[in-house]
Image (cartoon, grey):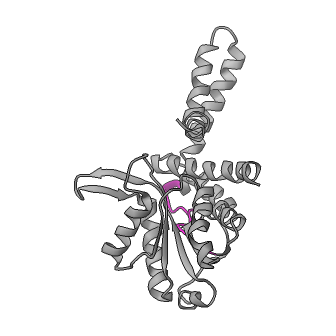
Amino acid sequence: MPFRYLFKQFVLPPGGLLLVLLLAWWLRRRAPRLAAACFTLGFAGLWLMSLPIVVQWSARALEPTAVLTEVDWPRLAGHAEVIVVLGAGRERADPAWGADQPGGLAMERLRYAARLARASGLPLLTSGGLHYGQPPSEAAIMADSLQRDFAQPVRWREETSRTTWENATETARLLAPLGLRRIVLVTHAAHMPRARWCFEQAGFEVLAAPMGFWGVANARPGGGWLPEGKAFWQNGVLLNEAAGLLIYPLLYR
């Protein structure tokens, strides 16, 4: 099992916070004050992670401010050569479709990439490997969806990557021999800083096309101060991105 998977499961929430609560229970008689501190930390962490207002604040700290507007889309061909859309997981064996399907985040990226491709005429590349270690690859699933759902053919598939860094390096293996270095990069706004850094390190000139912004006003009851399950998941994604921004330069420079 990859170390990065264990790290995410047992260090990042909810795993890490649950371990802190378990430690509080174990210390309840041996060290009551330390147990109380661990309980407070674990409970407060779970509560904060469940708040939409924390999603809003955290996303604003991570997301870029520059965006491509619809006016910019037809002009992309003058600044780039390829649209690269990054995978975001897949759902296995959906009975309604009879096959694996792109995850929800991936579908959001595909929709935006299709709009950009239609407006600009630029060719598409999908990037994503074997999410469960078995075919089809994320890139293949995304390419199928782009063709069948959005009528946009995909020229290249990068089907071996497992991380954002490998998205970039394996895409470079495909495009560098063709002399293609200027790309439009499509991914979620919170993921864009890490993704852009990786692709620039791989030698690309990157025109960022972020989408799926979470830093906008949350429009939730109570101003986003009431807990909800979706917010917990979103905060987990944002925390993963923040950790990636810190760790990637240490691992890959």
Asked which quadrant contains residue 183, the reply is: bottom right
Q: Name which quarter of the figure residue 47 lies in.
A: top right
Image spot of residue 78 (x, y percent): 61, 91
Q: Residue at x 64, y 14 (%)?
A: 27
Work out which quarter of the rendered image holds the C terminus and state it.
bottom right
Q: Position of residue 165 (x, y in %)?
A: 63, 57
- Residue 210 visible in the displayed image: no
Q: Is residue 146 above or below residue 97?
A: below
The residue lying furthest to the front in this view is 177
On the image, the x and y values in percent for residue 250 come to 76, 49
- Looking at the rendering, the stretch of residues picked out in magenta corresponds to 207-222
Depth check: give the residue in front, 48 or 21. Answer: 21
Please check the rendered image and state whether residue 221 is part of the magenta-colored stretch, yes or no. Answer: yes
Residue situated in front as seen by the camera: 64 or 226:
64
Magenta-span inclusion, residue 146: no
Residue furthest top in the image: 30
* Residue in the image at 53% along x and 86% along y: 70
At horizontal 63% and vertical 53% (from top left) the residue drawn is 241
Residue 99: image quadrant is bottom left
The percent coordinates of residue 86 (x first, y second) are: 52, 64
